[in-house]
Image (tube, rainbow, N blue to C red):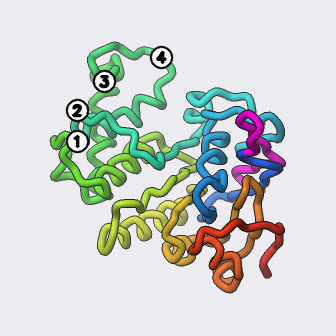
């Protein structure tokens, strides 16, 4: 059974159909990619799954739960975590402090205001900081833990945002252009991280403009355009699809199809 099920979702902004009958699924341990030109509806889809945007039609299921009407914080506690197209970190805080907020999101109560709203229990704080340092170490960010994120390059800031998401202990991780600003070794590290998370059973939904990165790192791929799913298939099948040229050239795409 799929861990995430998006069923016939529709979102309208005024007279514009941002999503029109979109469906997809992601299983645990699977990496699913979404390709499409700018304005295709990719980020809106992640907003709907994470609870930021409420669909006018359709259903979102996580495991056996219908989460369509569930608020963002409740979905986070069920294991939904994401990064954003525009990095959303607190620039005046350090790497460690930003990532610690991921641990905080799992707390139901007992928070105090100390700038970071850290866990009330000293023991809980110690355990959270230990968890943060373990995640930072796994991403090669340990030496930067006391560095304000505002001073870091974009690619590194995106890694910090991923680290914060991982501290939410997600069962579903959604990455919205996480590779933007990365190249070379850092991009390879991101690919290796995605593979490692999938092996551990995490369901991963990936949006990237880097088509080659998606083809190289995803088990299954959807192509979206004009708010509709236009094609779906394995990476090998999508590589052969003529719709890829439309994505590269920014042309309108249409005609939903399953790619064999």
Q: Nearer the viewer, mark 4 or mark 2?
A: 2
Query: Label 2 belongs to which residue?
Result: 92
Coordinates of residue 249 in the picture (x, y in percent): 58, 74
- 236 relative position to 23: left or right: left
Compare marks 4 and 3 and give the one earlier in the sequence. Answer: 4
1 and 2 marks in contact (CB < 8 Å): yes
Q: Quadrant of residue 92?
A: top left
Q: Nearer the viewer, mark 4 or mark 1?
A: 1
Image quarter (top left, top right, bottom left or bottom right) of the C terminus: bottom right
Q: Quadrant of residue 56?
A: top right
Question: Mark 1 to mark 2: distance in Å?
Answer: 6 Å
Give the number of the disc on residue 109. Answer: 4
Query: Label 3 belongs to which residue?
Result: 116
Coordinates of residue 183 in the picture (x, y in percent): 33, 70
Question: Mark 4 to mark 2: distance in Å?
Answer: 25 Å
Query: Label 1 belongs to which residue?
Result: 150
4 and 1 marks in contact (CB < 8 Å): no
Magenta part of the protein: which range?
A: 1-17
Is label 3 in a helix, a strand or a loop? loop
- 38 relative position to 183: left or right: right
Compare marks 1 and 3 and give the one earlier in the sequence. Answer: 3
Q: Nearer the viewer, residue 223 or 148?
A: 223
Question: Mark 2 to mark 3: distance in Å?
Answer: 12 Å
Mark 2 residue crowding within 10 angstroms, few (<14) / some (14–19) / many (20+): few
Question: Mark 4 to mark 3: distance in Å?
Answer: 14 Å
Question: Mark 4 to mark 1: distance in Å?
Answer: 30 Å
């Amino acid at each position: 059974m799929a861990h995430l099920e998006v069923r016939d979702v529709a979102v309208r902004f005024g007279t514009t159909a941002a999503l029109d009958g979109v469906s997809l699924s992601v299983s645990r341990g699977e990496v699913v990619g979404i390709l499409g030109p700018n304005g295709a509806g990719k980020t809106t889809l992640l907003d709907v799954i994470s609870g930021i945007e409420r669909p006018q039609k359709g259903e979102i299921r996580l495991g056996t739960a219908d989460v369509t009407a569930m608020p963002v914080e409740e979905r986070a506690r069920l294991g939904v975590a994401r990064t954003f197209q525009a990095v959303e970190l607190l620039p005046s805080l350090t790497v460690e402090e930003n990532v610690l907020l991921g641990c905080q999101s799992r707390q139901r109560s007992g928070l105090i205001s100390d700038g970071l709203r850290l866990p009330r229990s000293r023991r809980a704080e110690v355990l959270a900081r230990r968890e943060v340092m373990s995640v930072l170490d796994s991403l090669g960010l340990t030496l930067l833990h006391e560095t304000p994120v505002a001073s870091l390059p974009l690619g590194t800031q995106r890694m910090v945002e991923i680290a914060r998401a991982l501290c939410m202990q997600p069962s579903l991780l959604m990455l919205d252009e996480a590779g933007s600003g990365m190249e070379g070794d850092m991009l390879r590290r991101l690919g290796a991280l995605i593979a490692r998370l999938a092996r551990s059973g995490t369901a991963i939904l990936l949006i990237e403009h880097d088509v080659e990165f998606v083809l190289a790192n995803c088990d299954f791929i959807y192509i979206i355009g004009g708010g509709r799913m236009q094609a779906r298939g394995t990476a090998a099948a999508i590589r052969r699809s003529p719709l890829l040229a439309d994505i590269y050239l920014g042309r309108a795409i249409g005609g939903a199809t399953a790619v064999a």
